Image (tube, rainbow, N blue to C red):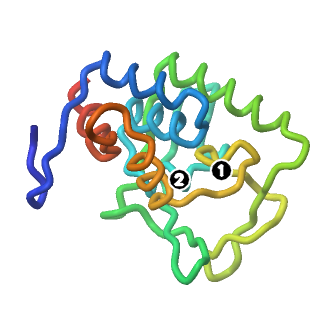
Amino acid sequence: VTENEGNPHVIYSDEEVKRYLEAYKDNTPLETAIMIAYHCGLRVSEMVALTWDDIDFGKKQLTVNKQLISKNRMFYFAPCKYSSTRTIDLDDEIIKYLKELKTKKESVPYRYSYSVNPDRSISGGEDFSFVVSRDDSKVISSDNIHTRLSYHRLGKDPLKMHSLRHTHCTK
């Protein structure tokens, strides 16, 4: 257990992560968030900002270059915390998962897509869709991920997404 401003972080075992993944198997946003946090170590605000063009399946890499924030019921792209733009190598398990997820989302008859406005706000459009989103590709906030996890508990405590970031660093 590590400390961060008095909030303990947990390092999850592979078995614990598998139990959470199984518990959230029918909840696409949570399952996807857990997979990305565990395999890539992203912050929640970075993972909800991921778009499909951030993933290079051929090179097996993910580019982290923005985070998604919500303000006054609008979503905006913002620079990563500490300007930590980076490229992450992806393992075969997450590549397989993401390819299957993309195929699943592309098969939905009506799905949301978005554009970026000059003020970096997000609105409906045709340019891109989000990786971590509802099944219909509708945007989901980091607060929504945390709230869903607190309501859908596995055992006594909800999964701590930031702890998966710490777990990733220990693998």
Q: Is residue 15 left or right of residue 105?
A: left
Q: Residue at coordinates 30% horizontally, 64% vertically from top-left?
A: 82
**For residue 156, above or below residue 48:** above
How many labels were placed on the picture? 2
Q: Amino acid at mark 1?
A: Phe
Residue 101, given in percent of the width and then of the height, sits at: 67, 30
Q: Residue at coordinates 52% horizontally, 72% vertically from top-left?
A: 70
Q: Is there CB contact under 8 Å for labels 2 and 1?
A: yes
Q: Nearer the viewer, residue 43 or 159?
A: 159
Residue 171, given in percent of the width and then of the height, sits at: 26, 23
Q: Residue at coordinates 52% horizontally, 24% vertically from top-left?
A: 94
For disc 2, the marked residue is 48
Q: Residues within 10 Å of mark 2 (few under 14, many from 20)?
A: many
For disc 1, the marked residue is 130
Counting residues from the start of the chain, the first of labels 2 and 1 encountered is 2
Q: Residues within 10 Å of mark 1 (few under 14, many from 20)?
A: many
Q: Quadrant of the N terminus?
A: top left
**Is label 2 in a helix, a strand or a loop?**
loop
Q: Quadrant of residue 83?
A: bottom left
Q: Nearer the viewer, residue 105 or 66?
A: 105
Q: Residue at coordinates 51% horizontally, 63% vertically from top-left?
A: 68
Q: Is residue 131 left or right of residue 2?
A: right
Q: Amino acid at mark 2?
A: Val
Q: Nearer the viewer, residue 120 or 13?
A: 13
